[in-house]
Amino acid sequence: MVIYGSRRKRSSSSGVQVDPACIEAFQSLKLGKKFKYVIYKLSADNTRIEVEKQAETGSYDDFVAELPKEDCRWAVYDFDFKTKDGERNKIIFYAWSPDGARIKPKMLYSSSKEALRRSLNGIAAEIQGTDLDEVAYDTVFDKINRV
């Protein structure tokens, strides 16, 4: 773990650092309900994880449409759903690594995931997605309804 000033930056096994803006965006989603979802990516030089997009509104379909078809990403989504007990929501972490992505980015995203995941306290479930079926609303609902 590397310390910069009063903020800690987590380092992954790949040496990639988590930008403090990633944690701030997550806190705004979790506590402030300012965002519906946040998408994270590796920087162009592959040295840090940064925020790619923050959306204040949007449906689940809008969120899934933001996931690139041939590149990896991480994301958090404030998942709203109904059960027999009423309306609920859970914050879901997504590790998106589509089949069409190149091998090197898949390996780098995989080895860097835990640094980001550990930085985001309050995640209810994690979804590993390699195709759209694995991140479909019904698939995610089935998984989190068991959690």
Image (cartoon, grey):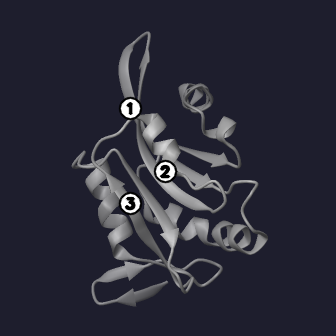
Identified at 23% across, 49% down, the residue is 34
Give the image location of residue 74, x and y in percent: 54, 59
Q: Residue furthest top?
A: 84
Mark 1 or 2, which is nearer the eye?
2
Q: How far is the residue under mark 2 from the one under mark 3?
A: 9 Å
**Which amino acid type corresponds to the residue marked 3 in the rendered image?**
Lys
Q: Are marks 3 and 1 in contact (CB under 8 Å)?
A: no
Give the image location of residue 5, x and y in percent: 29, 90
Q: Which residue has dot 2 on it? A: 66
Q: Secondary structure at mark 3?
A: strand
Give the image location of residue 76, x and y in percent: 45, 51
Q: How far is the residue under mark 1 from the one under mark 2?
A: 21 Å
Q: Can the viewer see residue 124 in this picture?
A: no
Give the image location of residue 120, x and y in percent: 43, 59
Q: Are marks 2 and 3 in contact (CB under 8 Å)?
A: yes
Which of these two is toward me, 61 or 146?
A: 61
**Which amino acid type corresponds to the residue marked 2 in the rendered image?**
Glu
Label 1 CA crowd tier, 10 Å (few <14, some 14–19, many 20+): few
For the C terminus, the image quarter is top right
> What mark, if any, has residue 89 been given in the picture?
1
Reply above or below: 26 against 31. below
Reply above or below: 110 against 56. below
Q: Secondary structure at mark 2?
A: helix
Which of the 4 image quarters holds residue 133? top right
**Which amino acid type corresponds to the residue marked 1 in the rendered image?**
Asn
Q: Which residue has dot 3 on it? A: 53
Reply above or below: 28 against 78. below
Give the mark nearest the N terminus, 1 or 2: 2
